[in-house]
């Protein structure tokens, strides 16, 4: 790009747009020629209208509060229970409605023995309880 001295007016600082227009026209022709070649069908899986509404969500049963004290006693909803009977009680709760089980909330004292906690968790697993939570 050359600057010409416009005589007494000083240097001329206008941009020469002719090469820019030439490049744009060449790009336009390239896009016009290649656009039909690049078209190909794309399968799109659109969601279909559902005729049957989804099943109604049932309200979950009240949770089971299981407390383990430091001396190893276990309380099922504030009533003492033997650890050996715990699995049978859990199985009864699961059998009421296997698809809508109550949540088992376990609260263990920090001084409680791990053996009791392990028995409680094994009983819950063997009874196939799915919702188990720990409370502090």
Image (cartoon, helix red, strand yellow):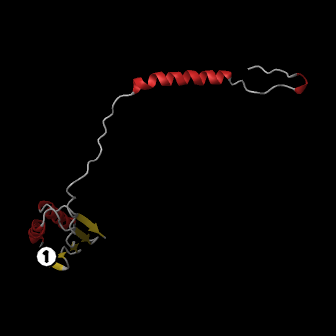
Compared to 8, does 129 lie above or below? below
Residue 26 falls left or right of residue 118: right
Quadrant assignment, res 12: top right
Asked whether 119 or 26 is in front, the reply is: 26
In terms of secondary structure, where does tag 1 sit? strand
Coordinates of residue 49 in the picture (x, y in percent): 25, 51
Residue 113 falls left or right of residue 27: left
Coordinates of residue 38 in the picture (x, y in percent): 40, 26
Q: Which residue was labeled with disc 1?
A: 81
Asked whether 55 or 49 is in front, the reply is: 49
What residue is shown at x 52% (from left), y 22% (from top)?
A: 29
Coordinates of residue 113 in the picture (x, y in percent): 22, 68
**In the rendered image, which quarter contains the C terminus?**
bottom left
Residue 12 falls left or right of residue 129: right
What residue is shown at x 55% (from left), y 23% (from top)?
A: 27
What residue is shown at x 11% (from left), y 74% (from top)?
A: 82
**In the rendered image, which quarter contains the N terminus?**
top right
Asked whether 43 or 84 is in front, the reply is: 43
Q: Residues within 10 Å of mark 1 (few under 14, many from 20)?
A: some
What residue is shown at x 44% (from left), y 26% (from top)?
A: 35
Coordinates of residue 66 in the picture (x, y in percent): 21, 72
Quadrant assignment, res 74: bottom left
Compared to 77, does 97 lie above or below? above
Q: Which residue lies most toward the bottom here?
A: 79
């Amino acid at each position: 790009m050359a600057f010409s001295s416009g005589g007494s007016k000083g240097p001329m600082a206008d941009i020469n747009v002719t090469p820019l227009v030439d490049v744009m026209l060449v790009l336009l022709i390239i896009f016009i020629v290649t656009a039909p070649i690049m078209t190909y069908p794309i399968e799109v899986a659109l969601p279909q209208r559902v005729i049957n509404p989804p099943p109604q969500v049932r309200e979950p049963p009240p949770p089971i509060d299981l407390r383990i004290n430091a001396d190893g006693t276990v309380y099922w909803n504030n009533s003492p229970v033997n650890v050996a009977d715990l699995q049978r009680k859990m199985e009864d709760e699961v059998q009421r409605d296997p698809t809508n089980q109550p949540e088992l909330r376990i609260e263990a004292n920090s001084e409680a023995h791990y053996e009791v906690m392990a028995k409680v968790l094994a009983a819950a697993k063997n009874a196939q309880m799915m919702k188990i939570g720990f409370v502090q």
